[in-house]
Image: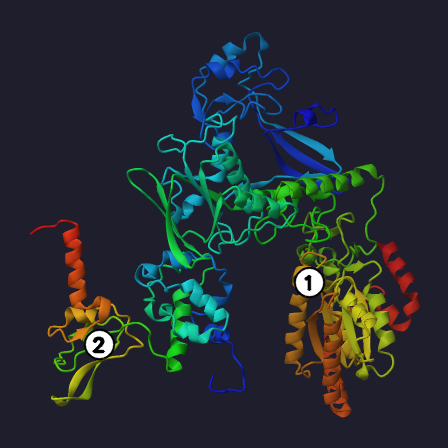
C-alpha cells in the first residue's frame, strides 16, 4: 500500500492476507451474525456480515470504526456454520491488521491501567490471552520513573481477565464493565431472583 | 398413469432393474431384472383381501415412514399396475394371504427374479432425484426435535390421501400448529454439503405456504430464505400473492433451532438481513426444504448407460444450452430431474422434448451421422504389431465409441457412437487411426500449401471447428484488424491437433503456431478440450526444453464470441515475431529442425502422409488404398 500509484481495492488487500481469501464469496445469508456469541446482545452494531460487505464495498472508514473489527475474539463459531466456507474471523483479523497498519485505534473500551497504584507484579501480563499487556518504563506523576503495566489497545479485547486477576485493582475495563457496575448488576439480578443469604 | 397403462403400445415394467445396456442408437439391447413380487401380475386383481389378513406392519416408504403398511402391500391405493407384492424382509411366512386369496391363486412364494432382454431403438432416462438428509445438519435438529420435519413430510401430512387424511398435526402432541416456519436452502447453496441451488425450493415453499394459508387463514407462516428466486412466468406474481396473503418472508439463513423442553415449541435464531438485527422467533412446527440430490444409485446407472455425470453427480447432457435433453450417447435422452434439479414445467417440457427426440429415431429407417468418423487401420494397431492393444484410444474417446473386447484384438470404432472429434486419432501412438475428411495427409497437405512460401513469416493457427474458428470468423465479420500473416487450419476439435502437426509445422519452418480451441466448459465433444489442453501442456514443456523463443508456440482458448480476443492474440504473436531479428529466427528454426525430425520419425509412415508430401492430390487415392487393405 506504500506505493500510492498502484490502486489496490480494500477487498484485494484483505484477500492478500491469509484468512481473508474468500471474502468475496459471501452472499449475505446472515448465519454468522446470528451464530455469533458476542453479537448484538452486547453490542447492537456488531455484525460480521456487514463488515464483509463493507470490505467488498470499499467502505474503509466504516470498517475501521465498526466494533466488529475490534470485538471479534476469533472463537470461530461462525466458521463451521458458514455455508460458503468463509473463514470470517480470518477476514476480520485481516481488516484489523490493515486498520492497525493505518494507525487506526480501537473503538471499544479497552483495559485502562491506574499507573498510581500499579506495582508491576506482571500477573496481568501473564494472564492476558491476547498478549496485549507489557511492563514498560514510564514517568508517572508523584512516583517518578518506574515500570508499570501498559495496554496495547489494538490487541486488547476487553475480556477483563486482567482486571479480575489484579491484586491492587489497578487495571480495569471502564464504563459498563467496571467492577462497580458488574457488582451492581449482580446485586440487581440477585434481588430480581429473590436470592437471600 | 392409469391412462398410460391402458395404452396397448405402452409397456410398464415396475419393480424392474436395468442391468446392462449394449449396442448403439436404434439397436440397443437392454438386460432387465424383473424382480419377483411373489404375486402373479396376471392373476392379482388388487382386491386387498391379502393385506387385510397380513399380521405384519412396517413403515411405508411412500408415506415417508409416517404410516404403516403390511408385508404384502401396494405403496398407495392408486398404484399402477395395481398388483400387490410381498416384502420378503418383513414376511413371516404365515401364508394367511394365500388363504385369503383363495381361488384366485395369485400368490406364489416360489417366484424367482426373471432376466429378460429387450431390443429398443431409443432410451429415455427419467430416474428423478432424491432428497438430502437434513439430520446431518445438527444445527437444525432434524431427528432430535420432533417438531422439525421436512417439507415432503408436511406434504404427506397435509395430503387428504395421507396418513392423517389431510389434518396437519405436529408430531409432538398431535395438535394443529398455529405458527409455522419454512427454512429454505437446507443443504443446498452450502459448500459443506450441496453447492448448487435446488432450483424449485423457493416456489415449493411459497406454494406450500399459500396452500396452508388458504386452508386456514389464521395460521402464522414465515419463510426464511437467502434469496427468493422466482424466474419463470407467473412465479413473481405468485410470490406477490403470498405476501399479500400475509405470509412473512425473512431474509436470513437461520443459524440454529432450539427447542423449548416443555412445550416442544421451536425457536429459530437468525439474522433479519434487511433489519441487520438478530431475531429469535418461536414456532410450533418448522419445515425444512432439503436440497435435491442425485439418486443414490445414479453412479451405477451412469456406468450401465455409459453416460457421464456433471460435477454435482447429475447425468451430463450433450450441451447445456442447445441440447439439454440429449445424452452424449446418441439414442439416450434425459427427462426431468435426473439431469439436474428442475421444477414441474421444465420437467414436462424436457420429457416431451426427449420423447419427440426418441420418436425421431424410431420413425427413421436410416440414421445419419457426421461423416467425420474415426477409422482404424487394424494392421497398424499395437494389437497386431505387438500383440497387445494399448487402449489409449478407448481411454481418450469421450463417447466410449471405441471397443477393445480383447487386448489381442485391434481397436474397433462403433461408427454409430463416433461423433468425429478426432481425439483418438491424435492420441494413437501408432498412428493407427484416421479421421475421414480430416486425415493426417489432408491436414498436412494444407499445412504444406500455406507454408510453401516464406514460412518463417507465417503464423499457423489451428482452430477448432466450433469455437476458435467461429472466433476468427467473428473477428473477420466485425472488421477487427489482425496480422495478414495468419494462416488458419480447421480441425473438428482441439483434441485432433496432433503433436505431429505442430512438430511438422516447425520442421517446415513456421514462424509461430497458435493452438486454439473452446473454453473447457464449452467443448462440443464433452472432454475433447481437456485432451487437447493436456497435449498442449506437454508440447509447451517440450518447446521450453528445446529453448524455443517464448511466444512462438501459443495456446489460447477462444470462444466463437471472442473475435476481439482472436485478433488481439494474433497481433501479440505478430509482435513477438517482429521482436526477433530474422537472422536469429532463422538460426533457431535451423537449430530445432533436427529435433523436430527426430520426433517425426514415424510420421511419414502414416498411410498417405509420405505420398501427400509429394503430391497432395493423390491423397484421396491413398486413403482409398488404405481402406482397401483394411
Q: Nearer the viewer, residue B461 or B82?
A: B82
Image x and y of residue B192, in percent: 46, 55
The Cα atoms of the two marked residues, 2 and 1, are separated by 64 Å
Q: Which residue is mark 1?
A: B529
Q: Residues within 10 Å of mark 1 (few under 14, many from 20)?
A: many
Q: Residues within 10 Å of mark 2 (few under 14, many from 20)?
A: some
In the rendered image, which quarter is residue B507 located in?
bottom right
In terms of secondary structure, where does tag 2 sit?
strand
Image x and y of residue B466, in percent: 76, 62
In the rendered image, which quarter is residue B372 located in?
bottom right
Q: Is residue B293 visible?
A: no
Q: Residue furthest top?
A: B103
User: In screen coordinates, is B155 left or right of B419?
Assistant: left
Q: Chain of mark 1?
A: B
Q: Nearer the viewer, residue B116 or A55?
A: A55
Classify A88 as above or below B321: below
Residue at x 43% of width, y 72% of height: A62
Classify B491 as above or below B317: below
Please tell me how many numbered marks the rendered image carries. 2
Residue at x 68% of width, y 64% of height: B519
Q: Chain of mark 2?
A: A
Image x and y of residue B56, in percent: 43, 20
Tags 2 and 1 touching, CB below 8 Å: no
Q: Which residue is mark 2?
A: A112
Amino acid at each position: 500500500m506504500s506505493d500510492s500509484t498502484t490502486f489496490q481495492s480494500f477487498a484485494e488487500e484483505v484477500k492478500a492476507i491469509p484468512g481473508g481469501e474468500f471474502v468475496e464469496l459471501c452472499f449475505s445469508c446472515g448465519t454468522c451474525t446470528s451464530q455469533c456469541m458476542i453479537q448484538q446482545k452486547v453490542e447492537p452494531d456488531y455484525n460480521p456480515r456487514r463488515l464483509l460487505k463493507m470490505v467488498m464495498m470499499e467502505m474503509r472508514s466504516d470498517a475501521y470504526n465498526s466494533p466488529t473489527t475490534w470485538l471479534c475474539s476469533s472463537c470461530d463459531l461462525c466458521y463451521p456454520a458458514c455455508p460458503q466456507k468463509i473463514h470470517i474471523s480470518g477476514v476480520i483479523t485481516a481488516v484489523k491488521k490493515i486498520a492497525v497498519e493505518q494507525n487506526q485505534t480501537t473503538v471499544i473500551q479497552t483495559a485502562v491501567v491506574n499507573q498510581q497504584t500499579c506495582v508491576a507484579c506482571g500477573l496481568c501480563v501473564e494472564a492476558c490471552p491476547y498478549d496485549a499487556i507489557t511492563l514498560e518504563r514510564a514517568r508517572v506523576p508523584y512516583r517518578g520513573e518506574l515500570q508499570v503495566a501498559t495496554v496495547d489497545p489494538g490487541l486488547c479485547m476487553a475480556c477483563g481477565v486482567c482486571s479480575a486477576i489484579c491484586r491492587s485493582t489497578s487495571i480495569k475495563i471502564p464504563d459498563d464493565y467496571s467492577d462497580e457496575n458488574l457488582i451492581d448488576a449482580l446485586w440487581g439480578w440477585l434481588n430480581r431472583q429473590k436470592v437471600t443469604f | 398413469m392409469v391412462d398410460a397403462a391402458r395404452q396397448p403400445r405402452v409397456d410398464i415394467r415396475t419393480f424392474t432393474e436395468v442391468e446392462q445396456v449394449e449396442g448403439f442408437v436404434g439397436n440397443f439391447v437392454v438386460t432387465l431384472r424383473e424382480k419377483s413380487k411373489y404375486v402373479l401380475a396376471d392373476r392379482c386383481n388388487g382386491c386387498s383381501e391379502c393385506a387385510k389378513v397380513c399380521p405384519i406392519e412396517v413403515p411405508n416408504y411412500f408415506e415417508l415412514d409416517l404410516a404403516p403398511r403390511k408385508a404384502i402391500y401396494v405403496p398407495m391405493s392408486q398404484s399402477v399396475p395395481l398388483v400387490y407384492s410381498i416384502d420378503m424382509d418383513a414376511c413371516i411366512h404365515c401364508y394367511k394371504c394365500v388363504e385369503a386369496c383363495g381361488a384366485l391363486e395369485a400368490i406364489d412364494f416360489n417366484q424367482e427374479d426373471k432376466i429378460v432382454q429387450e431390443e429398443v431403438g431409443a432410451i429415455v432416462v427419467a430416474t428423478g432425484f432424491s432428497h438430502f438428509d437434513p439430520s446431518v445438519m445438527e444445527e437444525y435438529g432434524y431427528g432430535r426435535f420432533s417438531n422439525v420435519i421436512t417439507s415432503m413430510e408436511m406434504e404427506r401430512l397435509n395430503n387428504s390421501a395421507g396418513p392423517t387424511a389431510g389434518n396437519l398435526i405436529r408430531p409432538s402432541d398431535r395438535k394443529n400448529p398455529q405458527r409455522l416456519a419454512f427454512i429454505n436452502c437446507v443443504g443446498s447453496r452450502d459448500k459443506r454439503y450441496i453447492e448448487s441451488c435446488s432450483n424449485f425450493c423457493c416456489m415449493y415453499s411459497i406454494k406450500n405456504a399459500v396452500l396452508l394459508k388458504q386452508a386456514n387463514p389464521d395460521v402464522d407462516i414465515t419463510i426464511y430464505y437467502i434469496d427468493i428466486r422466482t424466474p419463470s412466468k407467473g412465479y413473481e406474481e405468485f410470490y406477490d400473492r403470498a405476501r399479500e396473503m400475509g405470509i412473512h418472508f425473512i431474509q436470513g439463513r437461520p443459524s440454529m433451532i432450539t427447542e423449548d423442553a416443555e412445550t416442544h415449541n421451536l425457536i429459530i435464531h437468525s439474522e433479519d438481513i434487511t433489519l441487520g438485527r438478530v431475531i429469535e422467533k418461536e414456532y410450533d412446527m418448522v419445515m425444512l426444504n432439503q436440497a435435491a440430490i442425485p439418486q443414490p444409485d445414479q453412479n451405477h446407472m451412469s456406468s450401465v448407460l455409459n453416460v457421464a455425470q456433471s460435477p454435482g453427480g447429475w447425468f451430463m447432457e450433450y450441451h447445456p444450452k442447445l441440447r439439454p435433453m440429449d445424452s452424449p450417447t446418441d439414442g439416450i435422452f434425459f427427462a426431468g430431474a435426473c439431469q439436474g434439479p428442475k421444477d414441474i414445467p421444465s420437467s414436462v417440457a424436457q420429457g416431451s422434448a426427449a420423447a419427440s427426440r426418441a420418436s425421431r429415431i424410431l420413425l427413421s429407417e436410416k440414421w445419419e451421422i457426421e461423416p467425420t468418423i474415426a477409422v482404424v487401420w487394424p494392421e497398424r494397431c499395437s494389437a497386431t504389431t505387438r500383440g497387445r492393444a494399448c487402449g489409449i484410444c478407448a481411454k481418450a474417446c469421450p463417447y466410449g465409441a471405441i471397443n477393445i473386447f480383447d487386448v489381442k484384438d485391434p481397436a474397433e470404432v462403433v461408427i454409430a457412437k463416433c461423433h468425429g472429434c478426432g481425439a483418438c486419432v491424435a492420441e494413437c501412438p501408432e498412428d493407427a487411426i484416421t479421421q475421414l475428411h480430416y486425415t493426417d495427409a489432408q491436414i498436412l497437405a494444407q499445412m504444406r500449401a500455406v507454408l510453401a512460401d516464406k514460412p518463417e513469416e507465417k503464423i499457423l493457427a489451428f482452430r477448432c471447428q466450433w469455437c476458435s474458428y467461429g472466433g476468427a470468423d467473428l473477428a473477420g465479420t466485425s472488421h477487427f484488424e489482425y496480422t495478414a500473416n495468419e494462416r488458419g487450419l480447421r480441425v473438428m476439435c482441439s483434441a485432433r491437433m496432433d503433436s505431429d502437426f505442430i512438430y511438422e509445422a516447425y520442421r517446415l519452418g513456421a514462424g509461430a503456431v497458435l493452438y486454439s480451441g473452446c473454453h473447457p466448459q464449452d467443448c462440443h465433444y464433452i472432454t475433447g478440450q481437456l485432451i487437447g489442453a493436456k497435449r498442449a501442456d506437454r508440447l509447451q514443456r517440450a518447446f521450453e526444453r528445446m529453448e524455443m523463443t517464448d511466444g512462438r508456440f501459443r495456446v489460447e482458448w477462444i470462444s466463437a464470441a471472442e473475435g476481439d480476443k482472436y485478433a488481439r492474440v494474433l497481433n501479440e504473436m505478430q509482435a513477438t515475431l517482429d521482436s526477433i531479428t530474422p537472422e536469429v529466427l532463422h538460426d533457431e528454426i535451423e537449430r530445432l529442425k533436427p529435433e523436430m525430425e527426430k520426433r517425426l520419425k514415424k510420421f511419414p509412415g502414416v498411410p498417405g502422409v509420405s505420398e501427400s508430401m509429394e503430391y497432395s492430390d493423390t491423397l484421396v487415392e491413398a486413403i482409398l488404398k488404405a481402406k482397401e487393405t483394411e
